[in-house]
Structures are given as C-alpha cells and as structure tokens.
Amino acid sequence: MKKFLILQLRPENEASDSEFEAILRFGGLSHEEVHRIRVEQGNVEDINLDNYAAIIAGGSPFDVSIPEEKKSVVQKSVEEFFNKLFDKVIPQDFPFLGACSGNGLLGSYCGATISGTYAETLGSVDVWVTDEGAKDHLLKGLPKNFSAMVGHKEACDTVPPGAVLLVSSDACPVQMFRLKNNIYATQFHPEADVDEFILRVKVYKYAGYFPPEEAENLIEAIRKSDTPIPKKILTRFIDRYRTEK
C-alpha cells in the first residue's frame, strides 16, 4: 500500500500537530497510512512520487505575495521546495490537494496573481459549487451551497491559467480549483472543525489575520459554525486515491 504524503508548513508545533491529527481524523486515515514531513523545518529529501498515493499540503502563516526581501529564509526554502515539487506533480498530473497555502503556492506557480484583495478573517463563510464543480468527482452530489472554514491574508485574484474553478464565494471568488484531472487546491480548510479553528485564533492572535482585540468575538462566532461538507471533500479525495481499499 502506498502512503499519503502529508506536507506541513506551520512553524508553530501546537498548530502543526493539531492540523496533522485533523487531516487524519476527518480524512479517515491512520498513522500507518501516511508519511508526514514538516517542510518548514528544512533538510527535506527529494520527493519520489512513485512512493506515494497522493499528496496533501496544509496551511501556513507564510504569504506568497509579500515582497521577496521581506520573506524569511524559512519561507523562501518552503516556496523553493513547492516549486520543485510542482515541477514533478503537474507534468504527471499527480494527485495533490493543497489547503489555503496550497492554493496560493499552486496558484502562484501557475501564474495567477496572489494579493490581499480577497483576504478573509478566521471563521465560517458561505460558498457555492460552480457548474463545472458539480461535475467533479470530489463535489458531485454535494449541496450547491455550503459553509466552510477560512482564514487567510491573501488569495488568488483570478482563476490560475489552465485551471477550472470549482467553488466560489462573494468575498473570495477562487475558493477551490482543479488543474488537469487530479490536482486540487482549496482556499478554505477541509480539515478544520470548531476546535481546530479556535486553536488557530489563539495561536495566530498576533499574526495579522485579525485585530487581536477581536479574538474572543471570533471564537464565539466560530463556536456556532457547522461545516461538514468540506470534510466530505477531504474524505472523497483520500478515498479516490487510496491504492488499497
């Protein structure tokens, strides 16, 4: 059985560990089915795609759109890693699902402009499935409209060249896209639930996602959130690419 490669970018241990467990929990994966790599820790070996069933990339506090001179050494190394990875993933149409940062990294690689125009504070938002999205394996038969957890300081300004828009919203038009047949990116977080996002409010209180004094109000609003559909998208991706059922 080939494993799922879980790539993480969060420097904060508590947030990284929680995100990892959430991906496993809501994706229906066991620890034995995955290989976890924390990319931001550096010294990552070259990825041989033949060893894996699919790749899932988590979120991060890094912003692709900030000036190059303001990027840390860690962020530059993360971006370099993903650019080299996409050099392999895209020609092979290798199964990939990137959440939040994955959206920006993949979108930027494909030539989309990434900016703060469509930033969203941490919380639940309403999104909808496009006509093309309704035909996609990960979305077919799901509700046309659903709620999803978001929290990002940047997003794709337009659909990346060559990509198909699958999910959109008023506040952030590019919520999910697909490249070729098997490469996906979501601006929303398919792995996140209420507890996960409350933790992220606390961890990233001073990271620029929202005014720090708004933290408690955000937490109260998040407690009322109900976002089951994004988790089904994550589960469908995993079930689709498992090499052994």
Image: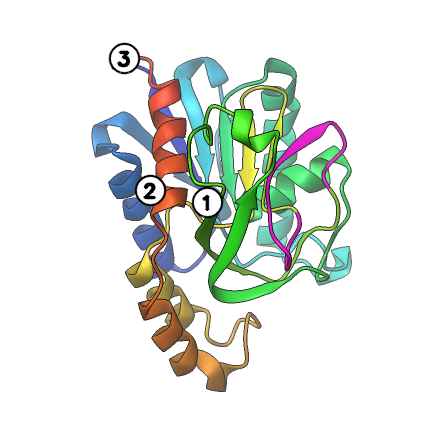
Does the magenta portion include 165?
yes
Q: CA distance from mark 2 to mark 3?
A: 19 Å
Q: Residues within 10 Å of mark 1 (few under 14, many from 20)?
A: many
Q: Which residue is mark 1?
A: 58
Residue 6 in sight here: yes
Q: Residue, x 75% and y 55% (percent of image)?
A: 68
Q: Earlier in the sequence, mark 2 or mark 3?
A: 2
Q: Earlier in the sequence, mark 2 or mark 1?
A: 2
**Residue name at image x 59 percent, y 28 percent:** 85
Foreground pick, 223 / 86? 223
Q: Earlier in the sequence, mark 3 or mark 1?
A: 1
Q: Residue at horizontal 48%, vertical 66%?
A: 122
Q: Position of residue 58 (x, y in %)?
A: 46, 45
Cα–Cα gap, marks 3 and 1 = 24 Å
For marks 3 and 1, give the one nearer the viewer. 3
- For image coordinates 77% across by 47% down, the residue present is 113
Query: Which residue is farthest bottom?
Result: 213
Q: Residues within 10 Å of mark 2 (few under 14, many from 20)?
A: many
Q: Are marks 2 and 1 in contact (CB under 8 Å)?
A: yes
Q: Amino acid at mark 3?
A: Glu
Disc 3 target residue: 244
